[in-house]
Amino acid sequence: MELLSVSSRLFWSFLLHATLFWCLSQRSRSATVPANETDRLALLAFKDRITKDPLNVMSSWNHSLHFCKWRGITCSLRHERVTVLNLTSLELEGSIPPQVGNLTFLRVINLRDNGFHGEIPREIGHLFRLERIDLSSNSFGGEIPSNLTYCSNLRVINFSFNELVGEIPIELSSLSKLRWLFLHVNQLVGRIPPSLGNLSSLTQLSLSRNNLQGNIPGDLGRIPKLGLLQISQNNLSGTIPSPIYNYSTLYLLSVTANQLHGTLPPDLGLFLPNLQYFYVSRNWFTGPIPVSLANATFFQELYLTNNDFTGGVPMNLGTLRYLYILTIGGNRLGTGKEDDLNFINSLPNCSYLEQFGFHNNSFKGMLPNSIANLSTRLHWLAMGFNHLYGRIPEGIGNLVSLTQLNLDHNNFTGDIPFSIGKLHKLQFLDLSGNRFSGQIPSSIGNFTELNELYLQENSLSGNIPPSLGNCQKLIALNLSQNNLNGTIPEQLFSLSSLSISLNLARNFLIGSLHMKVGSLKNIGELDVSENKLSGEIPGTLGGCQSLERLYMEGNAFQGTIPQSLNTMRGLRELDFSRNNLSGLIPKYLENFTSLQKLNLSFNDFEGQVPVQGVFENASGISVIGNGKLCGGIPKLGLPKCLVLRSKSRRFLSLKVIIPVIIVAVCLILLLLCFAPLLWRRKSRQKQLQTSSEDRYKNVSYAELLKATDGFSSHNLIGVGSYGSVYKGYFVSDGQIVAVKVLNLQRQGASRSFLAECEALRNVRHRNLIKILASCSSIDFKGNDFKALVFEYMPNGSLEEWLHPKVNEEHQPRTLNLIQRLNIAIDVAHALDYLHHHCQTPISHCDLKPSNVLLDNDMVAHVSDFGIARFLSGAVDDNSTNKTNSIVVKGSIGYVAAVKVLNPKRKGASLQNARH
């Protein structure tokens, strides 16, 4: 028994020692395995998700180096655990694996400016030590993980410039230590959670460029230290809550491009004394600009554009010495008084000013000389679409840093100052839509950096300066609608940079189109229409293979259309009308698949009209006024082409050939006599039946009401027998128009409306008033309303020039002999077109000086077709004399047309009479 007891004790002792040895050995073995192995495995999982690494960043993530030495990795010294993952701007692409949640010591994740995609893994919510996460400028999608709330130490969240969707999680409001929350430029929807007002440590909040809607929550006003609030470019509505204006710490407030309304508080600058950046553009704010803005002495950028602000501009803005951007365009600012621009006198004190714009307003007056004393840092100056007049100060040349200058659509007069040539840095210059006269200064050739130059719609004269050829960076040049003469300098065609447009239309240019025109290989539009150019179309024009719109109508070009133009396959619109071109219509035009509009009318083309491509669409082509054409699609109403005899019959005896030829000629003559009449009748019937083919559009009563400022007497420019004419301005496209409102209580007004629509719907001539739109509706009181919208004629009627009123504000205007002769010629051209070149001849019946309107260039336009008559009976048989007479109508005292006789009848004429 004793032996057994000893053996038992030995066994248990051995077992105890063996167990103790095993435990010690296991402890020793575990001590050799690193405790941070999970970090290494997590990083390797991250590496496996990288699909593109052009800079070979991941090459350092290998087994030969400890992971704490891998690029972009920072570890703690004590535990050798990953604390920072920083891979910014390395052109990496891939996704984030869920294993990133195992990096439990991680404090910073920065993957900014790469190509990561996929969803943000929810496992990031396990990183309770995380303080900063920046995933901006990637392509992450999906929703924002709501469990980020477990990362209670977060100071910065930047998910901007991604493709995140869904709503802003309300759970984010529990992150009491969060200072920056950047979610801008995503696709987030829903409302701004009011609970964000609980973020007591927040200093910067940016939610711009999403699809958020609803009101701005007033709870945001509870964030005590907010310095930046950026919620622009969403669909927010309502007003800015008053608590927002109580942030004395706020230095940036941006609500641009929403649907907000209301007025700005008068004490805005007192409530927000540290405001430096204020953006409220593209909303519906009304009322005046607060004078108190000057109290925010550190103001740097002020954007108030495209709202509905009214009144004057505070005179104390010049005290903002750090101001470098001031834009107040696109409002209704201006009092209509001569001192509207006095606020400019204080702005020279703003020595840092770089951008200044007050365009698209109602400012009136002369440009003060102090404009020349603005900051020499100024590079953007815009004051177009106002009511400014007088001369441009010579001192404008002092603004030597200007890169963009807009003075368009005002009433500036006089010469373009020569000193403007000092602006060597100009890239954009727009002086269009004014009344500048004199020559284009040759100093414009100093603009070697110029990209776009617009001088159209003025009264400039003389030659086009060859020095423009020095502007080798020009992409657009528009000199149209002036009084320029002489030839087109060949230096213009050396501007191979021209890619948008070269527009020289509606001048008095002479000579031929230079052969170097083919050098404009990149140009998209070339317009030399309505000049006095002659000669043949240069074959080199085919070198302009990027051309989409080519307008050469209204000149004296002759010869045939060159075969070399067949390379211009990108053409969309081509107009050769009203020239002296001859020969066959090129068949290659059928292959221009992009061609939508082709006008060859009023030339001397002959032969068969093609039937494919653009020629299949009767509304897309015009070949009228070419009496030798035949064939084409039936809708054109042209005679059939004669089929040539086969060669086997060419030796028929003269006894057979001559009678056949005589009969054929007689048939053709008969066909040519009756075909135009039939075609005109068919065209007329189709135009009456299909209103959708009208060239003018319909506008609503509300649009006209807004355009004329409620048909105010301030905009009234004329009163006639059947209605009143108002000056109007369409904000949508900046177009100034004349709106003729019919007085439907007057008998015959409705008939006059229909007559004018019918007369103008199918006429197109430089010297006829152009109808732009019509309105047949009811007003806001339920009454019938009819109106016509015409192009605006700035120089009024001929009557006002011949018989000026004694009590006119301006000095009486006079016409010199040349102007009178030009006006007479213009009227004669208009009547010749109405009587001989319309599809159906038209008699005006009320031609008088008050119905002859003058545009900016003193070009005459015949207007008021309210009692006009179609003369279809004028080509009927002589026996129908009754239909060829017109009852005397028009104004008492003078009648332009008493009786129209059949023009084919011997002795017929158009008689004039005075009472």
Image (spheres, helix red, strand yellow):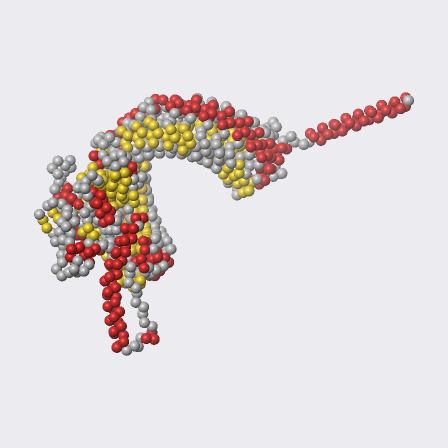
As rendered, which of 502 and 117 lies closer to the eye?
117
- Using the rendered image of the protein, determine whether residue 599 is visible from the camera's viewpoint: yes
The furthest residue to the left: 915
Q: Residue at x 91, y 22 (%)?
A: 1
Q: Position of residue 255 (x, y in %)?
A: 38, 30
**Residue 123 vs residue 580: left or right?**
right
Against 466, residue 36 (above or below) is above
**Residue 234 vs residue 126: left or right?**
left
**Residue 37 vs residue 690: left or right?**
right
Q: Which picture quadrant has residue 599? A: bottom left
As rendered, which of 521 and 778 lies closer to the eye?
778
Against 688, residue 6 (above or below) is above
Q: Residue at x 53, y 30 (%)?
A: 146
As rendered, which of 878 and 33 lies closer to the eye?
878
Q: Position of residue 638 (x, y in %)?
A: 28, 61
Q: Residue at x 32, y 59 (%)?
A: 634
Q: Position of residue 641 (x, y in %)?
A: 30, 65
Q: Which picture quadrant has residue 512? A: bottom left
As rendered, which of 508 and 220 lies closer to the eye?
220
Q: Position of residue 524 (x, y in %)?
A: 34, 50
- Using the rendered image of the protein, determine whether residue 372 is visible from the camera's viewpoint: no
